[in-house]
Amino acid sequence: MTEVTAPAVLVTLLTVAVGWHGAGGAHGLGWALLASVFASGIPFAYILGGVWRGRLTDHHVGVRDQRRVPLLFGLASATAGLALLAALGAPRPVLALVAAGVVGLVVAVTVSHWWKMSIHTAVAAGAVVVLTLTFGPRMLAAAPLPALAGWSRVRLRDHTVAQVVVGGVVGGLVAGLVYAALR
């Protein structure tokens, strides 16, 4: 479950769904793919490179002390992507989604300095909120997703229950506030 609910996977799938819907089909898919390169592709490639070079213990960046640089790199990539998307005239929902990711990364970098909040659960909760705002209440059917992500993270002993709960609350709030305000 940890692999299925990994932030890179969820961000990519969510971006495709929002892009497809927000810009009408194949045109939106192009915007979504461009956004995904900066929001998840480049940051995940950086993390995999860190694992390959031995600087990071795993692709989930499970050691809190190792999180700062990959999170800052991801923040820089997402911010650059947001600027490029805005300059090229990307649809508002795609811009809003990437902006929510940038704000979420700022929060994650800040919190991770002191505590290991679950980013898996934050992204999963944010995804449920964005899906519900985009497609309506029927998407509340995805509400178990953060709980499954959190269960997996606790079961693997990568997080405590408190770290999972806080991640879910923070992720849902950030996504709800930023995406709703900008879409």
Image (cartoon, rainbow, N blue to C red):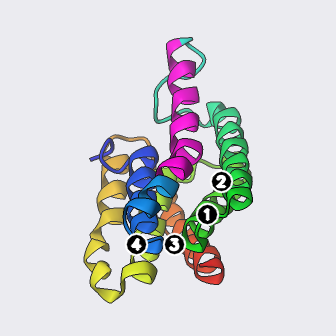
Mark 4 or mark 2: whose residue is earlier in sequence: 4
- Disc 3 from disc 4: Cα separation: 21 Å
Residue 46 sits inside the magenta stretch: yes
Helix, strand or loop status at disc 3: helix
Residue corresponding to mark 3: 172
- Using a 10 Å C-alpha cutoff, classify the residue at mark 3 as few (fewer than 14 neighbours), some (14 to 19) or many (20 or more): many
Residue corresponding to mark 2: 105
Question: Is residue 135 shown above or below 94?
Answer: below
Helix, strand or loop status at disc 4: helix
Relative image position of residue 32 (x, y in whole percent): 48, 56
Residue corresponding to mark 4: 21
Residue corresponding to mark 1: 90
- Disc 4 from disc 2: Cα separation: 24 Å
The magenta region covers 33-52
The reply to whether discs 3 and 1 touch (Cβ–Cβ < 8 Å) is: no
- Using a 10 Å C-alpha cutoff, classify the residue at mark 4 as few (fewer than 14 neighbours), some (14 to 19) or many (20 or more): some
Inspect the image, locate mark 2, and give the three-letter code of the amino acid beneath it: Leu
Mark 1 or mark 2: whose residue is earlier in sequence: 1
Mark 3 or mark 2: whose residue is earlier in sequence: 2
The quarter of the image holding the C terminus is: bottom right
Helix, strand or loop status at disc 2: helix
* Closer mark to the observer between disc 3 and disc 1: 1
Relative image position of residue 162 (x, y in whole percent): 49, 61
